[in-house]
């Protein structure tokens, strides 16, 4: 079960009953966070990403697009983007644990862990190569090659982690709960090699499921019956839950500045979005059209300005406001559940969802992204020639503007075979020879990285 459903046992029962009425097949596909204790703790890459599953959304006449990832039956718990093209998402389920995109979410590819597992709930990257994920059974894993391989940094088996955040390559935080469902917050100062407890609550059923960092020092942490604030990077915490109308489970947090912010979640009676304009000391309930439903839970909330924001509803709605939350309207709907939101520079917004889906909406008209292709309008990567080849081939690309270029070749397991280009280039047409004499026959991939844009193509070596 995803991290958003850890409210209490009554809530869990109501959620399950509601979903079963809507989706008959869910009973055989749902993954409980407490199942799968035989989790394979060594995560190994099984395949290089090369399967794309684009799918257009036809529910409403708007611009939201749903994309089917390789994780067909699992709940996508969180999605994260480092720039306009590179993003990752994790899911609650056994098998494929991470999916990745290099074309802004138009298509997603699998980065597989071991065949057994519980769930992953949080994912965060500091650049295109270095990132962390966390989940059940104390799982904390780190990658330094964009998700192809993961390093074990697990904490304790009887803990659950829901959210991970890193300021840089050394300082990071994971949040969750211990064996008594008490909130737990850890910090590392050496990139995850060692973790230190910096907060543990005394109250059961108070796990920290969400963290939001406003700046280097100020952050908010929320969960069932929990809302904490730090202004000194976790050296101390202020209990802000005392100012929230109880009972309330905080599942989403977003602040524009030190004063103006929103929380989303559930109190069981429809009061699921609150706004503050004085730093969390007073909260005003904001109505929304999801309230009349059986379980009006708002999973996440994001704003791109003081007026415009989105939320995700458990009952299958994406809601939007254009007046700071005073009024929420349905922006799109589906018969699935929506989870976490992610934005990048007010250009695009993504949403993770159930049954392996990632949804996205272009906030600005973009050029150069073609559905099913990662070609961009200021460079073009050609198919190598000849292809198949033995033992050499030529890789050609065009640049319309100057920039730093990397051209690399990978094998089918995601291992770097050779770096062909790694330098600043001026506009022009370039032809790079690649010699595969020392390689075995098989499928290889060449990736052109130019000015935060990437294009990948496949080639076949036959001997």
Image (cartoon, helix red, strand yellow):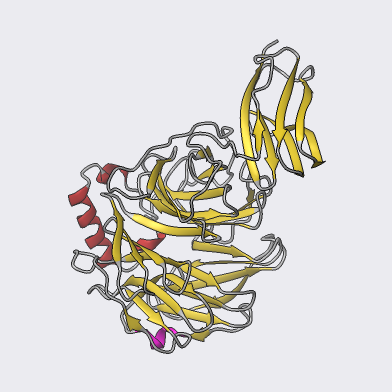
- Residue 84 image position (x, y, % from top left): 57, 51
Relative to 29, is 167 on the left or the right?
right
Residue 243 inside the magenta-drawn segment: yes
| Quadrant in the picture for residue 380 | top right
Which one is nearer the viewer's eye here, 425 or 254?
A: 425
Establish if 170 lies above or below 75. below
Q: Is most of the magenta stretch helix, strand or loop?
A: helix
Q: Residue at x 75, y 39 (%)?
A: 406
Q: Position of residue 226 (x, y in %)?
A: 42, 78
Label tally: 0
Q: Quick check: 305 above or below 247?
A: above
Q: Choose top left, top right, bottom left or bottom right for residue 196.
A: bottom right
Q: Is residue 139 visible?
A: no
The residue sitting at 17% across, 51% down in the picture is 21
Check the picture and name the quadrant holding the C terminus: top right
Q: Which residues are magenta?
A: 240-244
Q: Could you tell me which residue is drawn at 48 percent across and 50 percent down?
A: 365
- Give yes or no for residue 221 being in the magenta stretch: no
């Amino acid at each position: 079960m995803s991290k958003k459903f850890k409210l209490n046992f009554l809530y869990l029962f109501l959620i399950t009953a509601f979903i079963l009425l809507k989706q008959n097949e869910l009973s055989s596909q749902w993954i409980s966070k407490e199942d799968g204790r035989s989790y394979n703790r060594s995560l190994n890459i099984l395949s290089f990403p090369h399967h794309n599953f684009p799918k257009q959304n036809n529910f409403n006449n708007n611009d939201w697009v749903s994309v089917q990832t390789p994780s067909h039956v699992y709940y996508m718990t969180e999605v994260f983007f480092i720039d306009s093209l590179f993003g990752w998402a994790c899911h609650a389920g056994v098998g494929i644990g991470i999916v990745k995109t290099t074309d802004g979410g138009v298509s997603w590819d699998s980065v597989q862990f071991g065949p057994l597992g519980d769930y992953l709930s949080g994912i965060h990257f500091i650049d295109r190569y270095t990132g962390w994920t966390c989940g059940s059974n104390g799982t904390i894993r780190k990658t330094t090659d964009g998700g192809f391989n993961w390093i074990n940094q697990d904490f304790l088996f009887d803990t659950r982690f829901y959210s991970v955040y890193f300021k840089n390559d050394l300082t990071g935080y994971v949040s969750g709960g211990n064996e008594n469902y008490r909130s737990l917050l850890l910090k590392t100062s050496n990139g995850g090699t060692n973790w230190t407890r910096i907060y543990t609550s005394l109250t059961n059923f108070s796990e920290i499921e969400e963290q939001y960092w406003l700046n280097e020092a100020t952050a908010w942490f929320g969960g069932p019956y929990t809302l904490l604030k730090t202004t000194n990077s976790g050296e101390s915490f202020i209990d802000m839950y005392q100012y929230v109308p109880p009972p309330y489970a905080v599942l989403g947090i977003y602040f524009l500045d030190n004063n103006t912010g929103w929380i989303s979640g559930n109190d069981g009676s429809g009061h699921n979005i609150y706004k503050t304009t004085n730093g969390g000391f007073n909260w005003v309930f904001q109505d929304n059209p999801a309230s009349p439903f059986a379980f009006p839970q708002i999973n996440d909330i994001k704003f791109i300005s003081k007026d415009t924001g989105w939320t995700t509803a458990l009952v299958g709605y994406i809601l939007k406001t254009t007046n700071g939350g005073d009024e929420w309207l349905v922006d799109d709907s589906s018969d699935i559940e929506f989870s976490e939101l992610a934005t990048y520079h007010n250009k695009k917004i993504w949403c993770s969802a159930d049954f392996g889906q990632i949804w996205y909406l272009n906030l600005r008209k973009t050029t150069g992204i073609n559905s099913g292709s990662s070609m961009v309008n200021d460079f073009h990567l050609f198919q190598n020639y000849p292809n198949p080849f033995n033992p050499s081939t030529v890789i050609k690309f065009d640049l319309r503007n100057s920039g730093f270029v990397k051209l690399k070749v990978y094998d089918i397991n995601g291992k770097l075979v050779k770096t062909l280009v790694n330098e600043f280039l001026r506009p022009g047409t370039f032809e790079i020879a690649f010699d595969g004499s020392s390689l075995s026959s098989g499928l290889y991939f060449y990736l052109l990285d130019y000015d935060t844009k990437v294009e990948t193509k496949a080639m076949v070596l036959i001997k």
